[in-house]
Amino acid sequence: MQLETIRFGLVDIDEDKLITFDEGIPGLDMLKKYALLQFEESYPIIWLQSVDEGRVCLPVLDTFAVLTGYVFDIDDEDVKILELNGPDDLHVVSVLVIPEEIQRMTVNLAAPIIINTVTGKAKQILLSGTDYNVRAPVFSDIYKVIAREEVATDAGSVAETERNDCNR
């Protein structure tokens, strides 16, 4: 399926990978269907694109790819609603706020979005009993991930070049 978006123009979306928020997202209750758009140049930032309204697109963070120490429990009711059978069934993203001064970027760790990767059901849950902040600074954590990937990519390129030189 093709969707006209305000941020990315016309994009192809695999209908089998659509995400459904039965209750909507707080503040966007009327919009139920979304797709995760992931682009190599912006990863670990992903885009939660509304299928119902092409003008609505939220930047979200692939949370565990950046914040390895981020842990929380999902209550039994949410596990049931989302039909989760185990940790392999879920993907966690967190909403980002990206201001003009990008170094002030924050992430909402107090209300992650839980996605069942098998059924496509999703819900933003409010964590209780944690000290996680709704506006946690995250720029330096994202920068470390990007820098680490660039080093790995560059190192691979150098090794490939050296290997090719040795084989001549």
Image (tube, rainbow, N blue to C red):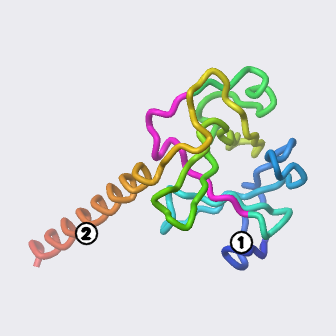
Mark 2–mark 1 CB contact (< 8 Å): no
- Whether residue 92 appears in this view of the structure is no
| Separation of marks 2 and 1 at Cα, in angstroms | 31 Å
Mark 1 closeness class: few <14, some 14–19, many ≥20 residues within 10 Å: few
Magenta extent? 57-71
The residue under label 2 is which amino acid type?
Ser
**Position of residue 80 in the picture relative to residue 117 (left or right):** right
Question: Which mark is on residue 12?
Answer: 1
Residue depicted at 59% across the width and 39% down the height: 109
The residue under label 1 is which amino acid type?
Asp
Q: Position of residue 2 (x, y in %)?
A: 78, 73
- SS type, badge 1: strand
Q: How many marks?
A: 2
Is residue 50 covered in magenta?
no
Q: Identify the residue under disc 2.
A: 157
Q: Nearer the viewer, residue 100 or 144?
A: 100
Task: Give the answer, above or below, for where 153 lies relative to 10.
Answer: above
- SS type, badge 2: helix
Q: Nearer the viewer, residue 135 or 88?
A: 135
Mark 2 closeness class: few <14, some 14–19, many ≥20 residues within 10 Å: few
Q: Position of residue 83 (x, y in %)?
A: 77, 31
Q: Earlier in the sequence, mark 2 or mark 1?
A: 1
In terms of image quadrants, where is residue 163?
Answer: bottom left
